[in-house]
Amino acid sequence: MLITYDEFRVRADGVMAEIAAACAAAGRDPREVSLLAVTKTHPAAAADYAARYGLAAVGENRVQEGVEKRAQTTAAVRWELIGHLQSNKARLAAEHFDRVQSVDSEKLLRLLDRAAGELGRTLPVLLQINAGRDPAKFGAELEDAPALLAAALALPHLRVDGLMTIAPLSEDPAVAMNTFANLRELRNRLAAATGTSLRELSMGMSGDFAAAIAAGSTQVRIGTALFGSRT
Ligand SMILES: *Cc1c(COP(=O)(O)O)cnc(C)c1O
């Protein structure tokens, strides 16, 4: 059951206030941090809520679910894929998503580039990095990131906006803080080495977004705090 729009608005106001507070504490301009509404498992109306509230983008973690919902709404939002992408869904993802955040292999890069070329478009992507060295998480290893970025930059139909990570689940807040610091340091190194800005750092979820903003996040991906728990 999706919450009502009024309930969503109260929750979204609360999240926006927390983002503003985290930015203030870090001496950052809140306009540097965007809020991606994670609508996975919720009906397409969740994307309508996001649009009505004025959010620019929603995140889905499964290709098929995102494609189906997108067809059910005219919500003026961008759709971003944030979940693991299988090779056999690369073409569908390139066709129906405005950006793919979960690119973690050269194989996926090549498949997405080819599909984007055939579709006559440039596909924005983020490289997903396992910056917390979590055996349970997808994402390229920190050591493999330079080669992955070099491969991405060589492909004509992809545009690399930056990096994405998911912090390991942990009781210890230091684990998420270290993960986010790792991603920011990696971005700074790669940007300097390649002369690209890699501006986007997609990091932070409902439980850890303040720490992510302190570490330099430019996009927090929030589901639970906006829509309630996923049952
Ligand atoms: C589900 C999901 C989120 C949102 O998680 P919440 O804890 O509900 O805010 C963010 N990023 C990814 C990759 C997800 O799969």
Image (cartoon, rainbow, N blue to C red):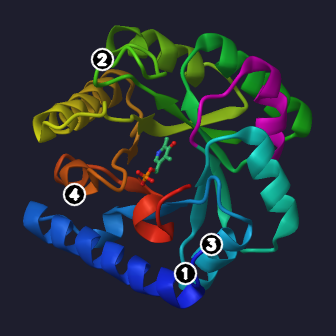
Ranked by sequence position, the earlier of labels 4 and 3 is 3
**Separation of marks 1 and 3 at Cα, in angstroms:** 18 Å
Disc 4 target residue:
210
Binning the other alpha carbons within 10 Å of mark 3 as few (below 14), some (14 to 19) or many (20 upward) gives some
**Separation of marks 2 and 1 at Cα, in angstroms:** 35 Å
Residue 70, x across and y down, in percent: 80, 60
Given the image, on which type of amino acid does mark 3 rest? Leu
Ranked by sequence position, the earlier of labels 2 and 1 is 1
Ranked by sequence position, the earlier of labels 4 and 1 is 1
Is label 4 or label 3 in front? Answer: 3
Marker disc for residue 133: 2
Given the image, on which type of amino acid does mark 4 rest? Ala
Element type at mark 1:
loop
Which of 220/26 is in front?
220
Which of 215/227 is in front?
227
Q: Is residue 55 left or right of residue 176?
A: right
Ligand 1 within 8 Å of disc 1? The answer is: no
Q: Please report the bounds of the magenta region as a residue range.
A: 82-96
Disc 1 target residue:
54
Is label 2 or label 1 in front? Answer: 2
CB atoms at circles 3 and 2 under 8 Å apart?
no
Q: Is residue 177 left or right of residue 32?
A: left
Q: Against 111, is 61 above or below? A: below
Q: Quadrant of residue 146?
A: top left
**Separation of marks 4 and 3 at Cα, in angstroms:** 25 Å
Disc 3 target residue:
2
Is label 3 or label 2 in front? Answer: 3
Binning the other alpha carbons within 10 Å of mark 4 as few (below 14), some (14 to 19) or many (20 upward) gives many
Element type at mark 4:
helix
Binning the other alpha carbons within 10 Å of mark 1 as few (below 14), some (14 to 19) or many (20 upward) gives few
**Separation of marks 4 and 1 at Cα, in angstroms:** 21 Å
Ranked by sequence position, the earlier of labels 1 and 3 is 3
